[in-house]
Amino acid sequence: MNITFLGTSSGVPSLTRNVSSLALKLSQSAEVWLFDCGEGTQHQIMKSNIKSSQIKKIFITHMHGDHIYGLPGLLATLGLSGNSEGIEIYGPSELRSFINSALKSSFCKLSFPLHFVEVENFALKNKILFENNKIKVNCACLKHKIPAYGYRVSEKDKPGVFDIKKAESLKIAPGPIYSELQQGKKVVLPDGRTFDGKEFCGPPREGESFVYCTDTVFSESAVSLSKNADLLVHESTFSQTDERMAYEKLHSTTIMAAKTALLSNTKKLIITHLSPRYTNKNSITPGDLLKEAQKVFPNTHLAKDFLTAEIK
Amino acid sequence: MNITFLGTSSGVPSLTRNVSSLALKLSQSAEVWLFDCGEGTQHQIMKSNIKSSQIKKIFITHMHGDHIYGLPGLLATLGLSGNSEGIEIYGPSELRSFINSALKSSFCKLSFPLHFVEVENFALKNKILFENNKIKVNCACLKHKIPAYGYRVSEKDKPGVFDIKKAESLKIAPGPIYSELQQGKKVVLPDGRTFDGKEFCGPPREGESFVYCTDTVFSESAVSLSKNADLLVHESTFSQTDERMAYEKLHSTTIMAAKTALLSNTKKLIITHLSPRYTNKNSITPGDLLKEAQKVFPNTHLAKDFLTAEIK
């Protein structure tokens, strides 16, 4: 899996950072899942390597405008392009009325179905939000001025790497039998020979896990959601020097984000949702925010619009 | 007065043209009036020479998303920046509920008042929409799939140019007396001498007039709204070759826009709201659209994002 940042600014867009959005490309299908959709996200998608027609799910963390005002436009454009068969939208319960009201006011009839999933109960009861044979999604309550939710996407373990050379050396002709062997099954060949798939596969490969937490002040539930994740993307609106403001506005500082990564044993942290007060012309720059976080969690990186990062 | 185009594409944004918006800078005050506000307008304002804090009025032509989805974000950003004392929003009656619902869903409380003016009756009864001692605004019903309104901004005539040299030659000391003379008033100086302001001013200067018509198929009311205007900005979604589609979708072709300018004796026409099917890589390019229109109305120009044009 990999992610592409489409918006990394907090609250309002700046000339170099749009408001929040991030696209997750799944590894085993051509699906794209969007996390948050601030105004101008459809414009950023157009400029990125993401295909909007591949968007199947949209996860919204909370109802502040810089995370949702791009939804009506993106959905309307997808409707006009006829490029979508349907989209599942996960988020707070108010999301349905926001989208329906905007589409209704603008006489916009989508050419595809929208399926809303209200995440409140899943987060409160720590229930799995979505699951199929390859992937699972959980969510957790964060701590912000209004209800906000973090999301975790965890791939199921994948079968071990299949030893084709071994199969060829044993004169097993390529075909559907290879995929049965790769799933570790026992097979009987036409010539009567039997083989155990387990002997052709390396150890199962651990699925990748990605966590997205914004907007929130430091929160234990973000720590538990991120347990042993491969990649945590966490908001870091404020520098440590503005900690008081972070507590006032229930946002995170660099240190809070880094602490969350440290305590949850995440492998890698990317800080995003930076306040536009920290530009390269100001006393504290985005680079300074990065250094602050790296003091606590060395494997921290700085989000930038259009940055693509592998989950592992 | 001058205008700056912030969005010149129809329906969806393209890499070079955002969805509809245009900023009018008034000549006798630091005010900016916005016409339509598609998604990404606040981003375009940031990249232009327009100051969002100067926006006092927003005129919306109709409720299609590519003309309104940028309103919640722009208003929220103005609210966060504390840069506005209040905005008047003119448009269809549904506009109030669209904006209020979006702001409410996103827990956004603006730091300034919004004053809504529903334009339906003004258009139907051809009543003046707004007027002060310097400027007047009218609106008219256009012909589109949903109710749409064109707007005309007409400056009142301005006093003639004041002949300072004459005043100086008559030893009239500069001061408030000059502005009284410029208003054509009779004045008595401290030394008892009397002067008639009319003898110090050139002929009154005709106010400038600007008309904005989109979305519409050819419409007589657009012709009458544009009577003798200095500048008409008219949608031209389709090439003449796609006339059938224009009638189907109740949009204009280049020829319809040019005919409106010709019949109304407008001095200058700028065509905008171009369908993204006409890019420079397609068989019909924006340049071709311009040529089509110029055949009927030679003084036609092509809108481009960030183009600034004087009204006269």
Image (cartoon, coloured by chain):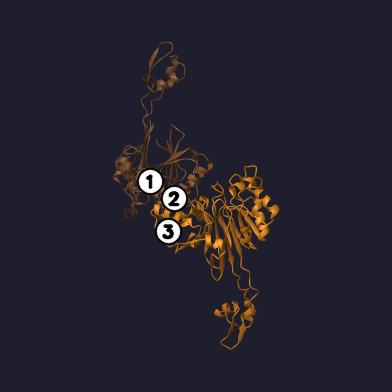
Chain colours: A brown, B orange
Is A13 in front, or is A192? Answer: A192
Image mark count: 3
At label 1, which amino acid type do we have? Thr
Q: Give the labeled residue for mark 3.
A: B79
Position of the N terminus of chain A by quadrant: top left
Badge 1 crowding class, 10 Å Cα cut-off, few under 14, some 14 to 19, many 20 or more, is many
Residue A276 seen from this side:
no
Q: Give the labeled residue for mark 2.
A: A101
Evaluate if marks 3 and 2 touch, with contact meaning CB atoms under 8 Å apart.
no
Badge 2 crowding class, 10 Å Cα cut-off, few under 14, some 14 to 19, many 20 or more, is some
At label 3, which amino acid type do we have? Gly
Q: Give how far apart the Cα atoms at labels 3 and 2 are.
A: 22 Å
At label 2, which amino acid type do we have? Ser
Determine the secondary structure under disc 2.
Answer: helix
Image x and y of residue A136, in percent: 36, 35
Q: Earlier in the sequence, mark 2 or mark 1?
A: 1
Q: Quadrant of residue A57?
A: top left
Image x and y of residue B174, in percent: 57, 79
Q: Looking at this view, name the residue that lies furthest to the top.
A: A191
